[in-house]
Image (cartoon, helix red, strand yellow):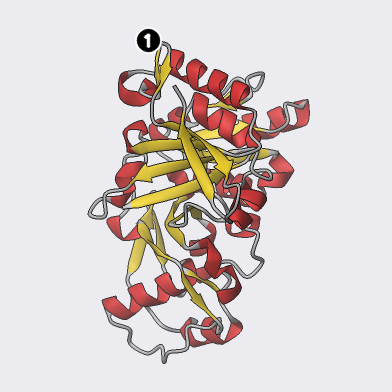
Amino acid sequence: MKLYKYLSTDAAIAFLKEPALRLSQNNSQNDPFEVLPTKIDIDKIIDISQKTIKIYGKEFKSHRDINPYLDLYGYVSLSKNKESMPMWGNYATNSKGILVEFEVDEEEPFSIFNIDKTNDIEAYLSDNVIYNRERSYGKTINNLSDEEINNFSKHYFFSKHESWKHEEEYRFALPFTNCNKVITLGNSKIIKNKLSSLGYKGDLEEKINDLTGLFYLAGFCEDELERWNSVWRNYEAYQVMFLIKIDPSKISKIYLGVNSNVKIMKEAIIEGTKLASGNRGRFYDSFKQKFMDVYSCELDSNLFELKYEKLT
């Protein structure tokens, strides 16, 4: 299936140089109700014992421990809508950014990411977002079967108010410990000391730092998980942004917004090609000096439609 990501100008330039998408926290979403269980549902599940899910060795009774369980999750949101003018405006800096098209395997949707699934397989969920008027799960919660447990989780991971329906969102939900990149938005001594105290050994003089060594080699004992979970949940105080790397072979097309700086975007693609290995550099042929599968968007002169012209 084809899915799309609208990116702002700065995010677009970074993505074209090295493909990665933000893994967003519950409290960083533009919808304040995002992944927020109702009091009614919390009261219903508080005394129900359920099977556990392991995330980096820590066991969660996924519904009794609903809030700490949800806090560990991050989300990557894509869209099935290629031509949404509101999303070009809201997410792509008034059409100054780009739209990235992904070819996603419906049988293996998480293959879009360059990750190893190091948690229980039940911890990885992806689906279309369902748009509702009602917020609560709305079903009796007693002695839930495995299917009902899954439905309850999916309700909060993949439900939004119907006012967001135009986004046609397809969402990936996965533990933040699968993040393999972090951007430090501030390089102050205070931030450096905070992260260093957690065992972070990245060079904070660099704008982009790689967390792979910490997450995949340190083994994550429970105390480390709790400390990094604090950074994850308080990302604004720590001035960090967590990202997850993309498998470049899943990128099928790139569309430059009608107001984008084509020269700057071309330069970012060329720079990414120089850094690339394998098919990651396939959007620019350095020998022929030719762009491939890159399109500029133009406004139709008569209709509320976009036209696409292939860059050469």
- Say if 222 sits above or below 12 in the image: below
**Could you tell me residue 64's position as x and y percent?**
46, 75
Q: Residue furthest left?
A: 107
Relative to 157, is 135 on the left or the right? right
Residue under label 1, please give it. Answer: 288
Residue occupying image coordinates x 53% and y 69%: 165
Give the amino acid type for the residue marked by disc 1 in the picture.
Lys
Relative to 53, is 228 on the left or the right? right
Q: How many marks?
A: 1
**Could you tell me residue 297's position as x and y percent?**
54, 39
**Could you tell me residue 272's position as x and y percent?**
47, 20
- Say if 61 sits above or below 143 in the image: above
Residue occupying image coordinates x 35% and y 56%: 124
Relative to 255, is 88 on the left or the right? right
Decide if residue 117 is in sight here: no
Q: Secondary structure at mark 1?
A: loop
Q: Residue furthest front?
A: 302
| Nearer the observer, 82 or 241 | 82
Q: Residues within 10 Å of mark 1 (few under 14, many from 20)?
A: few
User: Which quadrant holds residue 207?
Assistant: top right
Decide if residue 90 is in sight here: yes
